[in-house]
Amino acid sequence: MARRVGQTPLSSRPWGDAVSEAPSQPAPAKPAPAKPAGAQRRIGAALLLLWALSLALPVAVIREQDVWQGWMVLAFGFLGIFNWQFGWFANWVFLPATIAGMIWTHPSRRRRVVVLLLLIPPVIGAMLWREVAYDDGRHAIARFGAGYFVWIAAMLGCVVWQAAPLRRRPG
């Protein structure tokens, strides 16, 4: 066999002869990324749906003509810190925790515990919410609307969803 100009002998090639030195075993295929179980996605979607529904419903009635909708509480809830109310912060733990729970197959025990430690205190604070501060003073909440209870259901659902796997022992 004649060599072409510029072609090196097969023995001097670092990768060898592609034809004669075929690998004995095919290269292992990369495993497909694991996807969360369908139930995890459905639970997360249901929790997000409850949360979104709570934004559209009335949350609290302060006076008969003063009804707070869920979106209003979400938009102005940060002002609750001046009244020692921190329940609004549960939204900013709930959303990433729920979305991550829908994406990750097996979140670590540490992540779940961190989510619970960040979520439980503001949810308890929201359950103890009884008054609203206005310019003319503090006013008691006359009654809670359906949005409040739907929001609490979404938050407690997330707590249970995050805590349930912690009870299972591996192996």
Image: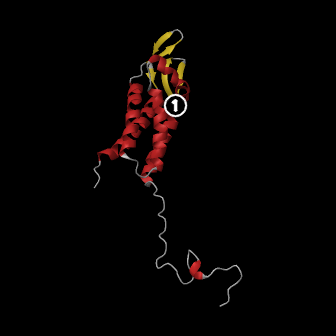
Q: Look at the picture and state if 14 lies above or below 149.
A: below
* Residue at the spot 36% in from the left edge and 45% down from the top edge: 109
Q: Quadrant of residue 6?
A: bottom right
Residue in the picture at 52% in, 31% down = 57
- Which image quarter holds the C terminus? bottom left
Q: Position of residue 94 (x, y in %)?
A: 46, 37
- Please count the marks in the image: 1
Percent across and percent down for residue 76 are 54, 24
The residue identified by callout 1 is 57
Q: How is the image coloured?
A: secondary structure
- Residue extending furthest toward the right: 5
Q: Determine the secondary structure under disc 1.
A: loop
Question: Where is residue 110 shown, x and y percent of the image?
Answer: 37, 42
Q: Does the image show residue 91?
A: yes
Q: Give the image location of residue 97, x and y in percent.
A: 45, 41
| Residue displayed at 41% across by 48% down | 107
Q: Amino acid at mark 1?
A: Leu
Of residues 97 and 63, the one nearer the viewer is 97
The image shows residue 16, relative to residue 138, as above or below, that is: below
